[in-house]
Image (tube, coloured by chain):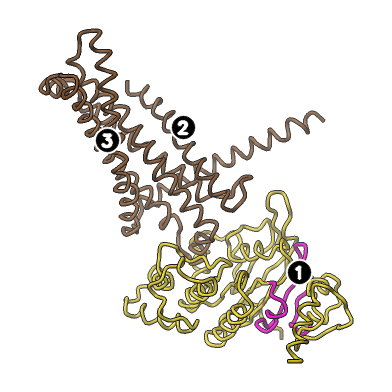
Chain colours: A brown, B yellow
Amino acid sequence: MLGQIIFKPVGGWFLRYLRDLGGSGIFLLNSLYYSFTPPYKWKLIIRQIWFIGYMSLGVILMTGAFTGMVLAIQLFYVLRKFGAESLLGPGVALSLVRELGPVFTALMVTGRGGSALTAEIGIMKISEQIDSLYIMALNPYKYIITPNFIAALICFPLLTAIFDVTGIYGGYLVGVKLLGLSSGVYFEEMKGFVERADLLIGLYKSLSFALIISWVCCYKGFFLGKGSSGFGARAVSKATTDAVVMSSVVVLIWDYVLGSYFI
Amino acid sequence: MEKKPFIKISRLRKTLDGVEILKGIDLAIHKGEIMAVIGASGAGKSVSLKCITGLFQPDSGAVFIGGRDITGMGMRELNKVRSGFGVLFQSGALFDSLNVYHNVAFPLKEKTRLKDSEIAKRVTKALSDVHLKDVEEKYPAELSGGMKKRVALARAIISNPDIIFFDEPTTGLDPVLKQSIHELIIENHQRHGFTGLIISHEIPDIFDVADRVAMLCDGKIIFCGKPDEIVRSQIPEVKSFIHIRDCGKYSWDTSWNDSMGAEGGIKRELDKEG
């Protein structure tokens, strides 16, 4: 009796969870396989680069600038206590390049592009557009999924670089123009502290975040209707919310894992 | 000797979320024939269509198309079979981001090496076959429900498929548009000679389109025969589903009383009276 009440639903949930996990793993492998095998749908890839990359520029510039500015204020406050204001430039740059640039870019693009991606693919699913590709003997991965994976892998590092540069100039505005630090000190110290390895860590992080976000957002849209959310507008809204929340959480967890590895 | 069926469904079973939807379907469709599958909502019509087209993997049973069992086929092999398919989905399933021209041209552009000029010719022909003109530049969102279905039909016929599947092609349309879509199916069937499988519950209109009708009830085919045979069927589920006292040329037991069917019958009587 107790088994029926407790173990059956828990076991059922666990099996469903395992099945979904396996399904999402297979989805990722398929997506990567088709992303790196021709033919490539260049028109669709360029369209997604425009959507994920170009359309995110505004929000990246804005958040990058203000992140750098806030960082400069906070770091200046701490560094002044130790008489080390001259390290403001390296502090801002290292924080942005190693950590905040890739993470904030990923979170911003998830909120702007990832949610739209899930909604678009989800609507294609419920309006049978994906089924129609299957029945036309065409591979939906090639038309819907891989353009997003490729576009994300191209755009994320570039957007991260733009975020970093904007943030460094945001920090410059606050540190040099507002708090009176010398411009030479701000940039010169940076050269000595920021190494190639730091830039590479930022690059690896942005590439892995691109993969995580396109994986989660595409999966949530492509397999819309799995589970109890049904198959209508509500399912699209739930999938979109789930995709954003899950992408953000996984990005932060993965950031910690990579951060620990690269320290 | 009996003709070998082009599509043969044998003991097809499918369970979804723990509910057995299809409980052993058997159906045979001959080449060039139009078969209509009717049934109440939830009877398993769409699930059976998805199993037949390979979108769902059945739990057991077989689906033979042109003599080959497609259940358990790999994607490459299945795609070879599917290249002879055309489908008109319930929603039309047109690609939102493409205009009408590119929607209709899509199968040719992606699956053939035809020149753009040849594709353009065939798109114009396909659109004229469904009585549409000057819509090439419009996007699906700018089209009415009936126009979307016509564009979807044009896309389904453009590559001259051997089989066209129609999933409730007239759902959500007014009676005039329903009639026109049915006429288009007949007209294009005569022109292209495809084998058709229509999932529908448009009774009695579908009887004018189909060569044979099968009724799906509770996951099983309970009747399969010609339209004039189904209206004479004494199977209780068939009688209660058809709900008609006057089906025009498909008239049957007029003493049978049913409130749902009365409206249609009365309307036809009034039309006759003029």
- Name the secondary structure under disc 1: strand
Residue B221 on the magenta span: yes
Please state if B142 lies on the left or on the right of A47 as rendered: right
How far across and down, in percent of the image, does residue A99 sit? Answer: 32, 27
Provide residue B236's location: percent of width, then percent of height.
86, 71
In which image quadrant can residue B43 be found?
bottom right
User: Relative to B13, is A61 above or below?
Assistant: above
Name the disc covering residue A48, or none. Answer: none
Type of residue at label 3? Phe
Q: Nearer the viewer, residue A56 or B125?
A: A56
Q: Chain of mark 3?
A: A
Q: Is residue B166 magenta?
A: no
Q: Is residue A4 left or right of residue B179?
A: right
Residue under pointer 1: B221
Q: Is residue A75 above or below residue A18?
A: above
Q: Which of label 3 and label 1 is nearer to you?
A: 3
**From which residue to which does the magenta span run?**
B201-229
Numbered label attached to residue A163: 3
Distance between mark 3 and mark 1 Cα atoms: 62 Å
Of circles 3 and 2, the one toward us is 3
**Residue type marked 2:** Val
**Residue A176 image-quadrant placement:** top left
Residue drawn at 62 percent across, 50 percent down:
A230
Q: Number of marks in the image?
A: 3
Q: Quadrant of residue B207?
A: bottom right
Relative to the observer, which residue lies in front, B5 or B202?
Answer: B202
Instruction: Please tell me whether mark 2 or mark 1 is closer to you in this view.
Output: 2
Spatial separation of the CA atoms under disc 2 and disc 1: 49 Å
Q: Is residue B163 left or right of residue A100?
A: right
* Element carrying mark 3: helix
Q: Is residue A192 left or right of residue A14?
A: left
List x then y, in percent, for residue B231: 79, 81
